[in-house]
Image (cartoon, grey):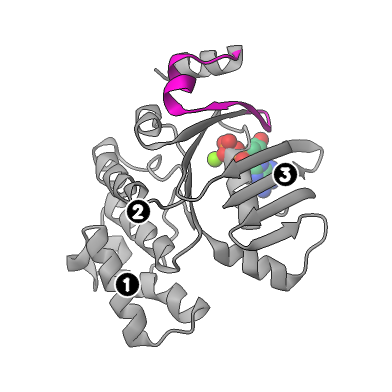
């Protein structure tokens, strides 16, 4: 479903991704953990070309690109295979909740307003916010805004959902409602990669956990194996420190 080979990305002299290989199966939930600055966000952002890697191969769904040379058309196709959920929601402030979700359908799928609104409303029900359809984002709590962000990402029916620390900007009491929504989506066999500091959640929801440090995948394995029996010193230290 997702295949990444030898992705390299640098910012100036700083090598941020140093030859990352990654495979994600259809329906698999992969959690990416690791210290701040290890390249987790950059990896996710490279998958839909929010950042441009210098080298490597990226395949998501049926679209494959060579990072060193690709056409605009290929880039566009690759972007449409995945949808990103950001730490800070990134909702349109001047659109209602319903319009926020419908907007991408109207733009990318050229859908009629009525059709887009119907799908958007169904998604709002899934994230438990159908009563907020006409509200503006500023009137919602952070947890509610993030649930809208997730509904919006799902609207385009992506091959893969990419979540970058979806709960780290939230007040602690709002984290669980968002995790609950992510849990329910994971159960529907949505292919997803989630960068998270919530180790307990990663352990519960992820089929596989990847530990990154300094632009490398240091260790990966099924959640229980990696958390209970990490093999690398670096992984051990990281898990201990967050426990
Ligand atoms: P993580 O998500 O694991 O915390 P990031 O992928 O955000 O790490 O960042 C990895 C490294 O790349 C960090 O050292 C960060 O400062 C650097 N970096 C990220 N984005 C940029 C950018 N746009 N320009 C320059 N450096 C960046
Ligand atoms: Mg990050």
The image quadrant of residue 13 is top right
The answer to whether residue 11 is above or below residue 134 is: above
The answer to whether residue 232 is above or below residue 112 is: above
Q: Which residue is mark 1?
A: 120
Q: Which mark is residue 5?
A: 3
Asked if marks 2 and 3 touch (Cβ < 8 Å), the reply is no
The image quadrant of residue 14 is top right
Q: Quadrant of ligand 2?
A: top right
Q: Which residue is at 57% across, 52% downward? A: 1
Q: Is residue 230 magenta?
A: yes
Q: Which residue is at 26% across, 40% downward? A: 176
| x then y, percent, for residue 135 | 24, 69
Answer with left or right where residue 141 lies relative to residue 200: left
Asked if marks 1 and 2 touch (Cβ < 8 Å), the reply is no
From where the camera sits, is residue 51 visible? no
Q: Within 8 Å of ligand 1, the CB of disc 3?
A: no
The nearer-to-camera label among 1 and 2 is 1
Answer with left or right where residue 102 lies relative to residue 236: left
Q: Earlier in the sequence, mark 1 or mark 2?
A: 1
59 or 211: which is nearer to us?
Answer: 59
Dot 1 lies on which element?
helix
| x then y, percent, for residue 62 | 62, 63
Q: Which mark is residue 146?
A: 2
């Amino acid at each position: 479903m997702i295949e990444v080979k030898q992705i390299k990305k640098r910012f100036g002299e700083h090598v941020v991704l140093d030859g990352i290989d990654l495979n994600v199966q259809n329906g698999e939930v992969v959690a990416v953990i690791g210290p701040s600055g290890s390249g987790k966000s950059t990896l996710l952002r490279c998958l839909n070309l929010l950042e441009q890697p210098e080298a490597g191969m990226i395949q998501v769904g049926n679209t494959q690109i060579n990072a060193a040379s690709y056409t605009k058309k290929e880039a566009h196709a690759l972007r449409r295979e995945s949808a990103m959920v950001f730490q800070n929601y990134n909702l349109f402030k001047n659109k209602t909740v319903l319009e926020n979700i419908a907007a991408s359908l109207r733009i990318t799928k050229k859908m009629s307003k009525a059709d887009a609104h119907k799908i958007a409303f169904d998604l709002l029900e899934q994230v438990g916010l159908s009563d907020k359809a006409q509200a503006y984002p500023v009137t919602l709590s952070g947890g509610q805004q993030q649930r809208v962000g997730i509904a919006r990402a799902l609207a385009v029916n992506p091959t893969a959902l990419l979540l970058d620390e979806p709960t780290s900007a939230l007040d602690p009491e709002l984290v669980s409602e968002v995790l609950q929504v992510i849990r329910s989506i994971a159960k529907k066999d949505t292919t997803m990669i989630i960068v998270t500091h919530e180790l307990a959640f990663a352990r519960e929801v992820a089929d596989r956990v990847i530990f990154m440090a300094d632009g490398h995948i240091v260790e990966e394995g099924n959640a229980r194996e990696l958390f209970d029996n990490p093999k690398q010193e670096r992984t051990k230290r990281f898990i201990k420190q967050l426990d």
